[in-house]
Amino acid sequence: MTNSASPIIELDFTDWSDPARFPEKQDEWTTAVENGQVLYFPHLAFQLSPPEQALLRENVLKSGARNVSLGGDGVLKHAAGAPDEQKLLAGMIGRYRQSVLTLIDGLFPHYRGALRVAPTSFRPKEVETRVQSVHADDRRMHFDAFATRPTYGERILRIFTNLNPSGVPRVWRVGEPFETVAKRYLPQIPPYSPIKAKLLNAVGGTKSVRSEYDHLMFNLHNLMKEDEQYQQNGTVATQPFPPGCVWVCYADGAAHGVASGQYMMEQTLHLAPGRELHPESSPLAILTRLVGHPLAGAGSAQTL
Ligand code: SIN
Ligand code: FE
């Protein structure tokens, strides 16, 4: 394992169920991921069968879509192929979800009963040639924040695997700690207006009323992506993730941007607010300390 100050921590497991055998390490892993470090498993491969290998093509995706996704209900979205191919795709993505759930249960048993499983995605597009607006461009360093789906402090834990069949790594840039970046941009964020948040929701701009926490996260995400100087200078580490590996991070607490790559699967798990091992190092707790008043966090946005 590399030292704990590094933004990337390497763990040498080869089987998704391995971490469960090291209960004495689980608090250390949980602390690291909550600190914004990326857990990197260089030898944890997600194996594809030969027919599944044939799914590694951009045109499995419906034109105009960004990712194929598989919901918890088993429904596959944005896939272009014939029913047989869609079945194969759903099987592959569903198996990834199961592997991830095994891994996460072994790594972070503290989260048992507090995780909500989001849809699983397969991302066949080449990062370098994707055309997107500044705010949608994940090549730019950012913390994840959803424009239309407020989280009220619920965390965004993400588990990635590179499936590239030609040895091409997915290259990430990883940045400074959440608090350092948040301090830089907070003075530029306009004050929160509950009235505006309600109006935005009334016209369908959000799926529920944006809380003050979500207002801060949304603006932080946008200001980081807009800032050319930060984009040039904000990188602490550049990490190639080769095919046959897995990496795990809190995408709302670890500054990241993807420089290049193609063919990845991703699973998001949402942790209930305050259910961290160290809730005091969450973005919600850090932003609350920095602004000096309680933020509309867990559940309170409903009553604004
Ligand atoms: C992200 O920014 O959340 C996705 C990064 C990637 O596509 O590798
Ligand atoms: Fe992201």
Image (spheres, grey):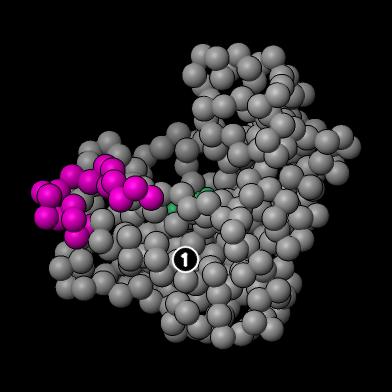
Was residue 77 drawn as part of the magenta stretch in this picture? Answer: yes
The amino acid marked with disc number 1 is Leu
Report x, y in % for residue 126.
33, 53
Specify whether residue 273 is painted magenta: no
141 sits left or right of 87 in the view: right
**Does 75 sit above or below residue 246?**
above
Q: Is residue 290 above or below residue 243?
A: above
The residue nearer to you, when weighing 87 against 176, is 87
Counting from the top left corner in percent of width and height, residue 301 is at 68, 29
What residue is rendered at 66% in x and 76% in y? 26
Name the side, left or right, on which 52 lies relative to 12: left
- Magenta extent: 72-89
Q: Residue at x 66, y 38 (%)?
A: 152
Q: Position of residue 162 (x, y in %)?
A: 38, 66
Residue 66 shows up from this direction: yes
Q: Nearer the viewer, residue 176 or 63?
A: 63
Name which residue lies at 68% across and 48% down.
273
Q: Nearer the viewer, residue 33 or 143?
A: 33
Residue 269 versus residue 153 in the image, above or below = below
Q: Residue at x 71, y 68 (%)?
A: 31
Residue at image mark 1: 101
Give the quarter of the figure containing the N terminus.
bottom right
